[in-house]
Image (cartoon, grey):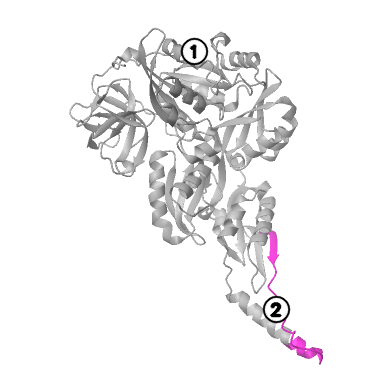
Amino acid sequence: MFHYNKDFIRNFSIIAHIDHGKSTLADRMLEITNTIPLREMHDQILDDMDLEREKGITIKAHPVTLYYTAKNNSTYQMNIIDTPGHVDFTYEVSRSLSACEGALLIIDATQGIQAQTLANVYLALERDLEIIPILNKIDLPAADIEGCKKQIEELLGLDPDSVLLTSAKTGQGVIDILERIITAFPSPKKNQYETLQALVFDSHYDPYRGVMVYVRLLSGEIKKGLKIKMMATNKSYEVLEVGIFSPHEKPQEILRPGEVGYIVANIKKPSDIKIGDTITSEKNPSPTPLPGFKLIKPVVFAGIYPVDASDFEQLRDAITKLQLNDSALHVEQESSHALGFGFRCGFLGLLHLEIVAERLRREFNLDIITTAPSVIYKIHMHKEQIIDVDNPAHFPDPTYINFIEEPWVKCHILIPSEYLGALMALALDKRGELLKTESMLGSRLMLTYHFPLNEIITDFNDKLKSITKGYGSFDYEIDSYQKSDIIKLEIRVNEEPVDPFSCLIHRSKADSKGRAICKKLKEVIPRQLFKVPIQAAIGGKIVARETINALAKNVTAKCYGGDITRKRKLWEKQKKGKLKMKEIGKVNIPQQAFLEVLKSEE
């Protein structure tokens, strides 16, 4: 039985590249410590979303409290925060690490160090966390234990002798990890203040109880009935329930310094909670808030619209609820001629966009359309005014533009050396600039590239995986804005511009993109009773065109024999009718056309 003692608490996070076994290791720890009865146990128990299980990835950080009786017969409270591994969810990782003293770094023994492994290690080192390196999947025949140890020493600067060997699937070596956590990770530090200070590192919306706030206590205590104050919003609430995750909510009498848990305090609005905020006591407030974690700005923008306009209010409620569980999601309302009312949303990357759209469809049963992703361009006008534009509809008149800057990223790519040629061809196509190449052990290369963000947000990851047969990985960080020749590619259907198909693109790519969209639209827009031109234009210049032929009616079918002038008369009459129809006719673009074009690649 655990009796509260700060020296017997360990708070740590599990970090790794995507699919290196974080959630599986957490499963084994839950099993060994009997946190979950065996009959309730299933794979990836901390990944409670269907989407997470389906894709085999962690999307949300999940806290869980375990009680482990060590070999020295002392019982320790261990607070694990399982984190995502994908580059788009770095924000979740940085939040989780803020609530920890240590990190378990998991490396797949068959794949070695990947790009995201490096990125997550740097996040942990920035916060001065203790790191325990763990080689997972050692039971597989392809495991290269010695090669991975050398990589850990060479790339991460960690002692190869301190590496623990484990197989999260079979449970081999998991007890050694639990024992090492006790000796290697420090207990929570004593805070300089005695008053209540709790860091808000996540939150979750419960339709019956309002907002559930995930906290890590640094000083003071929280119990039912206490009046608390949020330091960022200056709002006060009364605590209705406190508890820990085990891994489901388990109410407790009190939360003490060093512990990780949740608070329910009748908070009704998702917007009242700011992730990274400090909770303090209303009666005896803390003089200063805790240093929050830096807010990561969205880099990819896309419009989300309901297929049926009457679902707009439902979509607004759904996005508000999602925003609570995902504070990196940026939302603004907008409208489009073709799609009606919707929202302009900012995401951390393409997977983030895909996950949010999928959650809206599944969790809220909404039919939605997402427009093509774009990034923020800085447009410098003649009067030294700078405008941020992420939507082609807001692009100003080119005659007033001085120059345009686009965001560039620094990209670390890890690949086996035999794929170097294919990667360089891909990078050239994506306007990349090679900064440096480093060779690693086991014929692997780490290349540092400079890329325009616009080029890598759509299909770069898919193409990298296909050219390297799945062995390549990459990670990127926002670098700077650079001057670029960006133009607006406008798509016109029957001489009318269609905003959702328009995009901001580099001049060198505009022609091929225009041709691809026109070709796709020709396939998906149904034929009308008149000819429909589909054009891609840059300003007044048409760079691509396709024509949808008219549905033809054989008006001369009733003429058999007789003079040709009878037929000519009917054809002339039909021709005039077609011209009149073209003038007044409108082309209704089906929703499927929007979806197909957004899916299509260059």
Where residue 14 appears, x then y in whole percent? 48, 23
Q: Is residue 127 above or below residue 524?
A: above
The residue drawn where x is 33% and y is 34% is 213
Give the residue number, with chain letter if any, for mark 2. Answer: 553
Give the numbered dot on residue 176: 1
Q: CA distance from mark 1 to mark 2?
A: 80 Å
Give the percent coordinates (x, y) of residue 279: 28, 30
Residue 469 vertical position relative to residue 122 in the rendered view, above or below: below
Instruction: Please tell me which residue is depicted at 36% across the width and 15% down the height of the picture.
Output: 76
Residue 386 in view (yes/no): no
Closer to viewer: mark 1 or mark 2: 1
Range drawn in magenta: 541-569
Q: Residues within 10 Å of mark 1 (few under 14, many from 20)?
A: few
* Mark 2, other Cα within 10 Å: few <14 / some 14–19 / many ≥20: few
496 or 278, which lies in front?
Answer: 278
Q: Secondary structure at mark 1?
A: helix
Q: Who comes first in sequence, dot 1 or dot 2?
A: 1
Whether pointer 1 and pointer 2 mark residues with C-beta atoms closer than 8 Å, the reply is no
Q: Is residue 311 left or right of residue 577?
A: left
Nearest the eye: 289 or 481: 289
Name the spot of residue 326 as percent of width and height, x first: 42, 39
Where residue 204 sits in the image (x, y, percent)? 36, 38
- What is the secondary structure assignment of the residue under circle 2? loop
> What amino acid does circle 2 point to?
Lys
Task: Identify which amino acid the numbered label 1 is placed on.
Answer: Asp
Instruction: State the residue at coordinates (48%, 51%).
Output: 304
Q: Is residue 448 above or below residue 456?
A: above
Residue 241 shown in magenta: no
- Considering every residue shown, the one lying at the far front of the view is 39
Spot the residue most to the top: 72
